[in-house]
Image: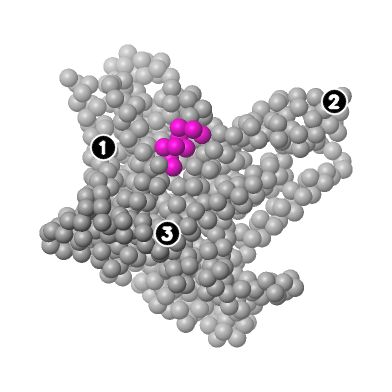
Amino acid sequence: MLTAASLSRAPGIATRRATVRPATVVAYLAAILIVGITVVPLLFVLIGGFRTTAQVNAAPVGWPSPWVADNYTAILGAPAFWEFLWNSMVIAVIATGLAVALGSMAGFALSRYRFRGREALYGVFTIGLLFPLGVASLPLYLLLRQVGLLENPLGVALPEAAFSLPVTILILRPFMLAIPQEVEDAAVLDGASRLGFFWRILLPLSMPALSTVTVLAFVTSWNAYLLPLLVFNDQSHFTLPLGVATFQSQYSQDTARILAFTTLSMVPALAVFVLAERRIVGGLSGSVKG
Amino acid sequence: MRRRLELTLLLGPALLLFTGFVLVPIAVAAYYSLYDWQGFGALTDFVGLGNYWDVLGGAVFQGAVGHNLVIVVLSLVVQLPVSVAIALLLNRKLRGRAALRLIVFAPYVLSEATTAVIWLLILQPGGFVDQALTVLGLHGAIHQWLADPQVVLLTLFAVITWKYLGFGIILLLAGLQGIPRELLEAAALDGASSWQAVRRVVLPLLGPTIRIWIFLSVIGSLQVFDIVWIMTLGGPANASTTMATYLIDHGFKRYEFGYGSAVAVVLFIICFAFALVYQRFALRRDTEGAMG
């Protein structure tokens, strides 16, 4: 018999009831636990940056007493951090721009044109998903050395763009496929060329998927560690993740400073994330629902 | 033909970039793997499959493969059920659900390098984790998290879990949201208990999402590098080496590029074989519609 009681026992269905269901209590507890485990390490690093190393050595865990901004100001005042930031930005912008531009063109071709071998070609791109960058890292390094792209931002940006193509095309193609033929026919009737349709109509229509792949490609490039590790020896060329790891090993005695540096390195990623969260999560949901 | 020109223009650049920086290196790695080569001068020392025998027969590499497999198994046995359980719990209308989603997903956005450094600092002897355990009265559970060979791999697994659990939960939540309410209501109408509804209705419908999760998780576990490299360099005494750290350590750092290429090819074959088999048997049903 259908009652409010039996209905609300079904998972995932919430009803407005006056009393609290035990499962809901568990849910809230789980939520608190998850938030705690997730956020506490980040808070630890953030707050720890406001202590001096002397404080940290005396008591590894504790509130700053007094609160000292020196670590943060010293890092922000020195060129190193900004260099890392700039290098990461340049590489990420190039890699993302290339991946999205080339990926959307390829996605367009693979979705709105019919030609022999289309599915096979799509398969070739998606196979790229299986290639760990690590597998290609060694010969990639040798290739870059041969063409003289070591110590060069392009030496990182170009391979990153290449490795981002599979995911980009994987997300864009179904989206572009879903755009009705009538829209394209109408554009043709209005005298637009195929490419004109691509540029003026399809791309704007694909904005949701485009922003998702943009964010994904950007974050992937921003967080990359292995490739920059192999390509860059000169510290002034380092990207942020590389800088964080190096800073940690170089200043291993100055714990408080490392805490501050690490916190600052999280800021760009978290800022982008907060602004773009709906795109990332939405894009994921979209791909899952197929 | 105009059309052919357009296709070339559209597909050409992407294909060129992809072939040049992804396909060619893989092929070249296979070629280099047949030689003993220190990275300079010509390739003169042909060893055929000698490198492969050395790789597969070496104790450290075998250990590395074992470590990767441990991580794969642990992620399936620990991360998957926990993620599903949490996703089910969080699928209700909780207050602050959007903020929760944001927080849970945040570690995924941080670089592995940053994650590694954060946890390096937290896991120090007498550091945050140790003190937290003491406060909770679990003083006996304290170990040398990164220095104890028995424990180090589990520690790394915990860090990896911290970073990626949120991603899995979001993925599963997306899948859960695709399940029509009517089905759950019908189940309730039929007198199904909560648990039965989960087992008979939700989990099967969550199948495709779970299968994607498994795919991404296994591939990721086979390739894990950044976190391990920064936190332990594969140590202590190769207790936490993975195939990827072995590749960089023995191939790159020691200038044994032929040998390293063989390791790369082996790693690739393992991933590729898994992907092929998985695609054929597990994902076939799911992608039938999508690929059509």
| Depth order, front residue of A104/B177 | B177
Task: Say if residue B142 shows up in the picture.
Answer: yes
Instruction: Measuring from the top left, give residue A180's x and y in whole percent.
Output: 43, 19
Residues at marks 1 and 3 on the same chain: yes
| Residue extending farthest top | A189
Task: Say if residue A276 shows up in the picture.
Answer: no
Label 1 belongs to which residue?
A: B15
Query: Per the image, is A36 magenta?
Result: no
Residue A174 sits in quarter: top left
Residue A251 sits in quarter: bottom left
Q: Nearer the viewer, mark 1 or mark 3?
A: 3
Quarter of the C terminus of chain B within the rendering: top left
Residue A67 sits in quarter: bottom right
Q: Is residue A288 above or below residue B57?
A: above
Magenta range:
B274-282
Label 2 belongs to which residue?
A: A2
Label 3 belongs to which residue?
A: B62
Instruction: Measuring from the top left, give residue A118's x and y in whole percent.
Output: 31, 25
Q: CA distance from mark 1 to mark 3?
A: 36 Å
Q: Nearer the viewer, mark 2 or mark 3?
A: 3
Q: Residue at x 41, y 25 (%)?
A: A177
Query: Would residue B263 be found to the left or right of residue A147 on screen?
Result: right
